Image (cartoon, helix red, strand yellow):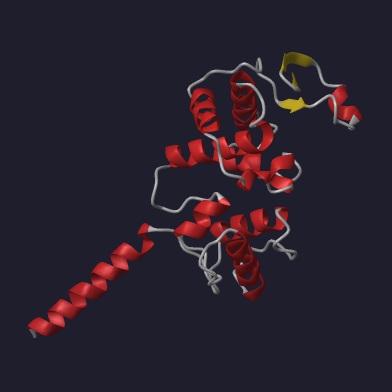
Amino acid sequence: MKKLCFILTLVISLSVCEPCFALSKIGSRGTEVRNIQTRLKAWKYYFYTVDGIYGWRTAEAVKKFQRKHGLVVDGICGPATLAKIGLPTGQSTSSTNNVNLLARIINGEARGETYTGQVAVGAVVLNRVRSSSFPNTIAGVIYQPGAFTAVSDGQINKPVVQSCYNAARDALNGWDPSGGALYYFNPNTATSDWIWSRPVVARIGNHVFCK
């Protein structure tokens, strides 16, 4: 009887602890799977419909991503893989996730800029979060299709320099050198007539910031 009680207690404990970290695998469904598919599709690992269903195609895309980034190649999105993709793992606070993700986009878009320029890029992301014209989360803004070159070309996955972490924290703490800008561009490389038509509010380093 004591042995049976011990086994039941162990089973209950494991059942309670299992949701303590995020994990998606074949058979999983929902928002997390959709987010995984969206990001892998943006990075050209996944080429199919974003349907929130973790099937073999999603698993194969995850394996390609894992192989590319030196992770265990099992096709399962556990904490390590989710962290590399930039999704919550259940092992850190949302505040830490926001700092890390914001630092990664700053690094991908502006690691060669001045520190003020790096903070300004982070501020643009946060200004979009506050705007009704954009998604209302940092992840939503960053991974909005076509929003940032660093997401499309994979620069968001590059090793992050320390100044970008510092810049992310300063932006989150309210510093906005961009003057409330919602967009920025490099005038030496921008080809869109639309972006050139936006009202300019600041020029910092190689970037023009506009609304």
Tell me which corner region of the image, top left, top right, bottom left or bottom right, holds residue 51.
bottom right
Where residue 35 appears, as percent x and y from the top left, is 60, 55
For the N terminus, which image quadrant?
bottom left
Q: Can see residue 210?
A: no
The answer to whether residue 203 is left or right of residue 90 is: right
At x 68%, y 34%, the residue is 109
Q: Across the whole image, how many numbered discs are drawn on residues?
A: 0
Drawn side of residue 193 relative to residue 113, left or right: right
Residue at x-position 15% and y-position 84%: 4
Place of residue 23 in the rendered image (x, y in percent of width and height, measured from the top left): 47, 63
Is the residue 129 above or below the residue 67 in the image? above
Dividing the picture into quadrants, the one containing residue 53 is bottom right
Residue nearest the viewer, comparing 40 with 128:
40
Front one among 15 and 57 = 57
Q: Residue at x 70, y 41 (%)?
A: 150
- The picture places residue 119, in percent across and down from the top left corner, at 59, 23
Residue at the limit of the structure toward the left, as seen here: 2
In this rendering, position of residue 17 left or right of residue 88: left
Along the line of sight, the residue nearer the viewer: 174 or 50? 174
- Residue 89 in sight from this viewpoint: yes
Q: On the image, which quarter does residue 120 sit in?
A: top right
Residue 43: give x, y in percent of width and height: 70, 54
Quadrant in which the C terminus appears: top right
Is 150 above or below relative to 27?
Answer: above
Which residue sits at x=47%, y=42%?
97
